[in-house]
Image (cartoon, rainbow, N blue to C red):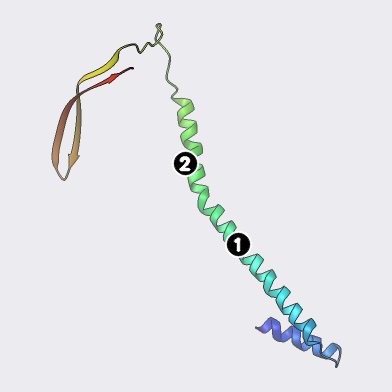
Amino acid sequence: MLFIIIVFYFTYQSSQEFNFAAFAVIIYIVQKIFVYIQSGQNKLHNINAAVPYLQNVLRYQDEIEKHIEKNEGGKQFSFKNNIRFSCQAIIWMAQDNIGQSRFTRSVWSK
């Protein structure tokens, strides 16, 4: 608001013929400039908010490169009939209770 008053004062002092249309255009353009600045600040804030996530992804990629699995198998993998995982156990803790579940799972090929 102070800026508008200052612009109005200098416009009125520079010439005694005050052009309201020109003044309105100046106010509109100044308002648009402030809108673009605010939009840029919001985008910059969003980028800064995403930086920690990017750092975590890059750290995770470095950890993956450090712990690459070694391919020590000599035979080719073949899935002809089924894969069976038997007597597998899952153990979990929930509210000071320990739970355990045993399962057998088979995957069949077609």
- Residue at 60% from the left image edge and 62% from the top image edge: 41
Spatial separation of the CA atoms under disc 1 and disc 2: 24 Å
Name the spot of residue 71 as percent of width and height, x first: 43, 14
Instruction: Give residue 79's quadrant in the image.
Output: top left
Name the spot of residue 101 as percent of width and height, x first: 16, 30
Residue closest to the eye, 98 or 32: 32
Instruction: Give residue 12's quadrant in the image.
Output: bottom right
- Asked if residue 85 lies left or right of residue 46, the reply is left
* Residue found at the very far front of the displayed protein: 110
* Residue found at the very far bottom of the displayed protein: 16
* Residue found at the very far top of the displayed protein: 74
Residue 10 to residue 66: above or below = below
Mark 1 falls on what kind of element?
A: helix
Q: Which residue is mark 1?
A: 41
Residue 33 to residue 97: above or below = below
Mark 2 falls on what kind of element?
A: helix
| Amino acid found under the numbered disc labelled 2 | Asn
Residue 5 to residue 88: above or below = below
Which numbered tag is attached to residue 56? 2
| Amino acid found under the numbered disc labelled 1 | Gln
Instruction: Give residue 98's quadrant in the image.
Output: top left
- Of circles 1 and 2, the one toward us is 1
- Asked if residue 28 lies left or right of residue 76, the reply is right
Which numbered tag is attached to residue 24? none
| Between discs 1 and 2, the one toward the N terminus | 1
Name the spot of residue 88 as percent of width and height, x first: 20, 23
